[in-house]
Amino acid sequence: GQQLNQSPQSMFIQEGEDVSMNCTSSSIFNTWLWYKQDPGEGPVLLIALYKAGELTSNGRLTAQFGITRKDSFLNISASIPSDVGIYFCACPTNQAGTALIFGKGTTLSVSS
Amino acid sequence: DADVTQTPRNRITKTGKRIMLECSQTKGHDRMYWYRQDPGLGLRLIYYSFDVKDINKGEISDGYSVSRQAQAKFSLSLESAIPNQTALYFCATSDVRGGRGDNEQFFGPGTRLTVL
């Protein structure tokens, strides 16, 4: 079945550092999404990418849709303590038509 | 007020009991979803509904059933709960208007279910 391989699984960084995480698949997807889950909350959409090669920013966050349509990365610049949480990549699953499959997540810890 | 609400937020039950988790939304979205989250496994789709008369199985529907009582309400039932159904359960909604389809989903706060 379709899978999204997300790495790294966890990251421990100092406040002010930049962060990079990525998501890869053996399947082609036409949409890549990045969600963040704060502790005790549901995931919230950060960035949506709809075109191969697209680079999109949302404040300190930047995400790119890979040219091959099989990968995406998310960068966070100048991290702050409130960046703590779990970051998920997600793509619409072709088999179900429109529902999402998720990567296993990258847990980010930021020390001040 | 939250756009997507889930009740209860926490529930502890025993093996074999029937459990219902409820989800309500005020976003006016047609499509609703149930996911479960297990540590280190991300979110996995259980069931989804495109409207009141259209319900579809997701990746892990065995042991679960759903009911779409109205556009705004989507319930998940565990007919006979077992310990490996202990997880965090999320409801989500999406809107097909605007051309983006289901890609942008909005999640509730989750229900933490423990089956002893």
Image (tube, grey):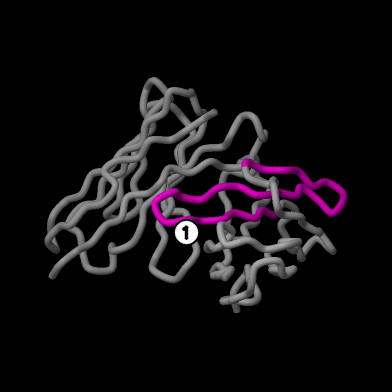
**x, y percentage for residue A26?**
43, 23
- Pick the quarter of the image with the C terminus of chain B: bottom right
Horizontal side of residue A88 vs B45, given as left or right:
left
Locate residue B24: give its quadrant: bottom right
Q: Residue at x 20, y 49 (%)?
A: A19
Q: Which residue is mark 1?
A: A44
Horizontal side of residue A30 vs A55, given as left or right:
right
Q: Is residue B24 visible?
A: no
**x, y percentage for residue A27?**
48, 23
- Pick the quarter of the image with the N terminus of chain B: bottom right
Q: Is residue B104 visible?
A: yes
Disc 1 residue crowd, few under 14, some 14–19, many 20+, Cα 10 Å: some
Q: Is residue B113 magenta?
A: no
Chain identifier of the residue bearing label 1 in the image: A
**What kind of residue is marked 1?**
Val
A30 versus B109 height, above or below: above
**x, y percentage for residue A2?**
52, 30
Q: Residue at x 83, y 46 (%)?
A: B54
Bounds of the magenta segment: B32-59
B72 versus A5 height, above or below: below
Q: Residue at x 47, y 59 (%)?
A: A44
Horizontal side of residue A39 vs B87, given as left or right:
left
